[in-house]
Structure formats: C-alpha cells, structure tokens
Image (spheres, grey):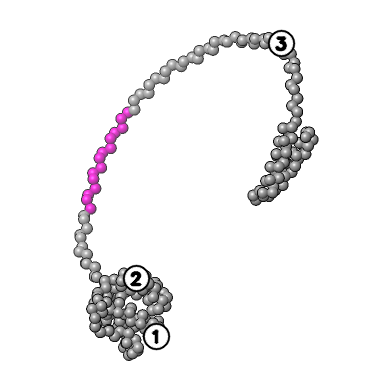
Amino acid sequence: MDLQQAQVLLNKINALQRSIGLDESAVSSIERDLMLSYIRQLYEAYSSLDIAAPGPKPPARPEAPLAMPRQPEIKPEPQPEIPPAPKPAPPPKPEPKPEPTPPPAPKPEPEERATPAPTPPKPTPPPAASSEPMDPRISALFRAPAQRELSDKLSQSSVGDLAKALSINDKLLYANELFGRDMSNMNATLEQLNRLSNMDEAKPILVKLAEKHDWTEEERSEVAESFIKLVRRRYA
C-alpha cells in the first residue's frame, strides 16, 4: 500500500471525526467500529512501507573560535555622604493632672412591690349533654353488657391511655368506620377523652360523633359498641 492510499484513509478518518463531533450524544457502535477499521488499515499501510536507508552524514565543518568579549572596566562607585545625626528633641513638658471628679450620689433603690400570684386558669368544663331526647338507637350503643364470665371481667380492666391501647388494625378500623376515614380527627378525640375524668363527661362527645358519622348503621353499630366499651375502660 503506498502513501496515496494512506492519505485516503486519513481523509476518511478526519471526515468521520467531524461527523461524530456534530452530534453531542454518545458515539454509535457502527461509527466506533468504522473508525477502528480505518485506523487499523492506516496502521497496516504504514507497517508495509519500506524504510529508506539513512544516507551518509555530511562532514562536520570546523567551528570558528569564538572571540572573547572584552570585559568593561569596573569603576568603583563613589561612597555616599552620611548626613550628621539629628539632634534629639527636647522632652515634652508634663501636662497638669485633672482634678478627680467626685463620684455621683447613689440613686435611691425603688421600693419592692409585692407581685400577686397568678390566678390559675379555670379548667375547661366538658361539653354539656344536649337537652334534646337521645335517639334510642344511640342509647342502645351505651348499654353496658352483663359480665358473665372471667374473660368479660378481664376485658373491662382499666386502660391508662386510649391511643396506646389500640393496635394498628384497631386504629384503622375505628378511623374508617367511626371517624369518616379521618385518622387525625380520631387521634385528637382520643387525646380529649384521655383528659376527662369519667364516662359522664365523655358521653356527650361520643353522642355527637355517633350522630355525625351514623354509628347506628347496621355495619357500624358493632364497631361503635366496641369503641364505646374501650372508652368506658378508660374511666374504670
């Protein structure tokens, strides 16, 4: 292969490189394989060329001796004149000391006034029971079942915190069936019920919830009775 074919390969390599440079995305496998093929052919083209034997070196010419530059005469620099030292300035006269200012008279201390103790806030009374007659279906939800067996007595044991007494499944069940799928409303109600003292204070809150979310419906009544039973254990 001669140099003309090598030049053709170089032109192909340059043209392919310009084409690849126009596209900013990744190089395709076809372009990569084509470029490697051109480079391999160019390498083989130069590998097959005959290397010319080196010719005889021309005789070295004798170098002319370099003329030594003439060194300039160094003249001694004149010594600078040292000016005489200045006379020391006279010491400053001492300034008269100002007379000390007498300290100001102490201010009279204000009389301490007795601060009255803050009045403790009055406890918020629980919501009063409605004077309207209660729906008998809602009243039926609050009927305490008779304790017949030991398991019934154990199920009526006291609960210190309503939120902690519920499992995750119970929370999801009560929130979906009794609180309109509102978990935050249920948690707020549980905190409010924890702060009350007895079931009489908690009953108006439960009645309003029963009226709002239709606890007397057949598919919710059993879940509502279970929830009211748990609240009653809070005040046992």
**Residue 49's quadrant in the figure?**
top right
Q: Secondary structure at mark 2?
A: loop
Q: Earlier in the sequence, mark 2 or mark 1?
A: 2
Amino acid bearing label 1:
Glu
User: Gap in Å between the C-alphas at discs 2 and 1?
Assistant: 24 Å
Q: Which residue is mark 3?
A: 62
x then y, percent, for residue 81: 49, 14
Q: Is residue 102 magenta?
A: yes
User: Gap in Å between the C-alphas at discs 3 and 1?
Assistant: 124 Å
Q: Earlier in the sequence, mark 3 or mark 1?
A: 3
For the record, the magenta segment spans 93-107
Q: Which circle, 3 or 1, is nearer the viewer?
A: 1
Q: Which residue is mark 2?
A: 167
Q: Which mark is residue 218?
A: 1
Disc 3 to disc 1: CB gap under 8 Å: no
48 up-or-down from 166: above or below: above
User: Gap in Å between the C-alphas at discs 3 and 2?
Assistant: 108 Å
Q: Earlier in the sequence, mark 3 or mark 2?
A: 3
Q: Is residue 110 magenta?
A: no
